[in-house]
Amino acid sequence: MKTARAAWRRLEPVHGMIYFVPEARRRYADLGLSGRAGYFASRGAAFGRASAELIISTFYNFNPAFVRQAVDGAWDATTPQQVLDARYAAAGEALRRAGIHELPDLDEVLALTRRAAEAAGEHGQGRPLFAAHAALPWPEEPVVQLWHAQTLLREFRGDGHVACLLTEGVGGLEALILHAATGEVPVDLLKATRAWPEEQWAGTRERLRERGLLDGDSLSPEGLLLRRHIEDRTDRLSLPAYGALGDAGCERLAELAGPYGRAVVEAGLLKLG
């Protein structure tokens, strides 16, 4: 399980950069999608003309009012296929800017990642975001294929993570506050990107304290146990994908993926623009 998690984490920047790079913002703007509309429409376009309610449900931790406002009119301005085409084009352009296409062992990294992603496709039940993306055709360019494969693995894992949160009675805003309490992500960034009103944030934080999950603004011992349980359970739910590689394959992918993740970071593709 640890090797599978390492393989995912080290390659995850290859997918995650699409939410930050100017290439994506420019292409979405050309389609008439400004601000966060580009994010919601591009990630939701695999569903077709995704409604705000579908995005709220599957993305899980965004302020519903913010989603409704951002998505309003998006599908009057463009089509899901145009958005998907723009997303793939932006991914390829940004990853080439980072030099991903010139890194060694690309064929092997792609082969391992694609094998895991295709294995995940046999376990799509109950994973709506993954299933929608898995139904899309594979791109032709190897660099974009790698992005697509890692996107599938990210959504596969993400759907499992939402299932764990629901099982433990942790709502979207509660999950954000517990995440902020780890210190891994700045609280101001989570507040800005998820757009929950301050009074709702404060009220939910107080309820988490009453549940014994927070000690001040930090995780309590009970909160630490819950977070660890959710993360461990999420790891286990991702195993149908990475199990196809076996321990040796996961170790090999984790070994090879390091330079790919670092190249994305060093090229500044994860910086907020």
Image (tube, grey):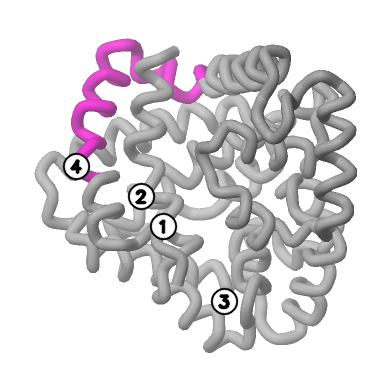
What amino acid does circle 2 point to?
Answer: Val
* Chief secondary structure of the magenta portion: helix
> Real-space Cα distance between discs 2 and 4?
11 Å
> Real-space Cα distance between discs 1 and 4?
15 Å
* SS category of the residue bearing label 1: helix
Q: Nearer the viewer, mark 3 or mark 1?
A: 1
Q: Is residue 102 left or right of residue 206?
A: left
Q: Which one is nearer the viewer's eye here, 38 or 120? A: 38
Q: Is residue 103 left or right of residue 100?
A: left
Q: Residues within 10 Å of mark 2 (few under 14, many from 20)?
A: many
Residues drawn in magenta: 239-260
Q: Which one is nearer the viewer's eye here, 23 or 182? A: 182
> Real-space Cα distance between discs 3 and 2?
22 Å
What amino acid does circle 1 point to?
Answer: Met
Q: Which residue is mark 3?
A: 82
Tags 1 and 2 touching, CB below 8 Å: yes
What amino acid does circle 4 point to?
Answer: Pro
Magenta stretch contains residue 259: yes
